[in-house]
């Protein structure tokens, strides 16, 4: 097995994809089109309701999704995080291996995190997420022997959910800095940024080589809705940044130079997973020796391919086909 080029720490969630009717959501008292955080009891209740159907299981979570795509694009990628010593955990490991990711998942005594994704006939996705063992990932779970062989450390802002996760990330950051491993940070979510604004700015300035963010996250970080101003401010504190602007395309900052990359004229149907795919395209391009602006173009292209289809799931064959045309 190849040594990893990318070592990623994330929240491994088993996606449980179920095709259902609007009436099922009403019966369960679930608001449509929303991501709900639920406890273990509620997750079991929802799963049992659909026990006559045949769900599709898929390894998920933001950082894992990015690494699945990097692997499909030809970059040896390792994902670590905490899962349960249960059936969902076993499914996660087997599915990750099937997609070509180098598994380094840590199993603990508790339930594997899961996200029940209910897809209604109109393509709308309603998510019910239980984080489970994800929240217990600790500094002792960071495999320094594997990390030292990697070129990049990748993580997202979702790892700031607990002190245990945060301490693990800081351990990996400090080790990476001592061993000349480039550090990539995707701030991940506006609500996470609101809770950790000052700390995120501090680590971006002092520890991060490459950062990904969208315009909403930048607005919170720099207290301005003008993304040109916030992009400029971000470019002054980090070497490389990929900034996602939705319908307006993206901005890449590199050594304090700012480049706007306009989008292609496509019809966007579902933006789910677009940010994860943007990061995958950007990171893969850097691994293949491209400059940051070229990497931003590839990241944008792959994100656009994902959002052209409603309710699309990760399609390893499609990603591999795109890889042949892009690299």
Image (cartoon, rainbow, N blue to C red):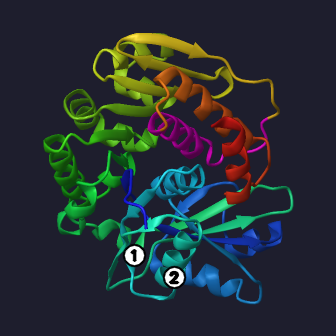
Q: Is residue 323 above or below residue 140?
A: above
User: Between disc 1 and disc 2, whose residue precedes?
Assistant: 1
Check disc 2 and report its element: helix, strand or loop. Answer: helix
User: Which SS does the magenta portion mostly show?
Assistant: helix
Q: Position of residue 14 (x, y in %)?
A: 54, 71
Query: Is residue 274 rendered magenta in the image?
Result: yes
- Quadrant assignment, res 135: bottom left
In the picture, which quadrant includes the N terminus? bottom left
Check disc 1 and report its element: helix, strand or loop. Answer: strand
Q: Residue at x 71, y 78 (%)?
A: 55
For this orientation, the residue located farthest to the front is 1
Q: Which span is picked out in magenta?
A: 268-287
Q: Position of residue 122 (x, y in %)?
A: 85, 56
Q: Nearer the viewer, residue 208 or 311?
A: 208
Identify the residue under disc 2: 88
Q: Nearer the viewer, residue 231 or 7?
A: 7
Q: Is residue 195 visible?
A: yes
User: Which label sits on residue 83?
Assistant: 1
């Amino acid at each position: 097995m190849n040594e990893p080029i990318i070592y990623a720490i994330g929240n491994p969630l088993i996606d449980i994809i179920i095709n259902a009717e609007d009436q099922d959501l009403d019966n369960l008292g679930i608001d449509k089109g929303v991501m709900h955080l639920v406890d273990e009891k509620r997750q079991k209740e929802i799963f049992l309701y659909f026990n006559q159907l045949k769900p599709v299981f898929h390894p998920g979570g933001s950082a894992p999704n990015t690494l699945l795509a990097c692997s499909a694009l030809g970059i040896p990628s390792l994902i670590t995080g905490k899962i349960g010593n249960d059936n969902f955990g076993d499914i996660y490991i087997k599915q990750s291996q099937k997609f070509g990711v180098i598994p380094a998942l840590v199993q603990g005594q508790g339930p594997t995190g899961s996200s029940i994704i209910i897809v209604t006939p109109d393509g709308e996705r309603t998510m019910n997420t239980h984080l489970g063992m994800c929240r217990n990932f600790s500094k002792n779970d960071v495999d320094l022997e594997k990390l030292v062989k990697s070129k990049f450390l990748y993580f997202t802002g979702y790892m700031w959910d607990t002190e245990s996760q945060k301490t693990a990330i800081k351990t990996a950051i400090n080790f990476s800095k001592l061993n000349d491993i480039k550090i990539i940070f995707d701030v991940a979510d506006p609500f996470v940024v609101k809770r950790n604004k000052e700390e995120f700015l501090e680590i971006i300035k002092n520890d991060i080589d490459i950062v990904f963010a969208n315009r909403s996250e930048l607005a919170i970080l720099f207290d301005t809705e003008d993304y040109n101003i916030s992009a400029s401010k971000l470019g002054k504190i980090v070497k490389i940044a990929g900034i996602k602007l939705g319908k307006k395309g993206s901005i890449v900052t590199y050594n304090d130079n700012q480049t706007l990359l306009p989008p292609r004229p496509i019809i966007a149907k579902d933006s789910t997973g677009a940010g994860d795919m943007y990061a995958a395209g950007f990171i893969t391009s850097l691994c293949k020796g491209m400059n940051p602006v070229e990497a931003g173009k590839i990241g944008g292209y792959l994100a656009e391919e994902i959002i052209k289809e409603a309710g699309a799931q990760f399609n390893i064959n499609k990603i591999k086909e795109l890889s042949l045309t892009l690299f």
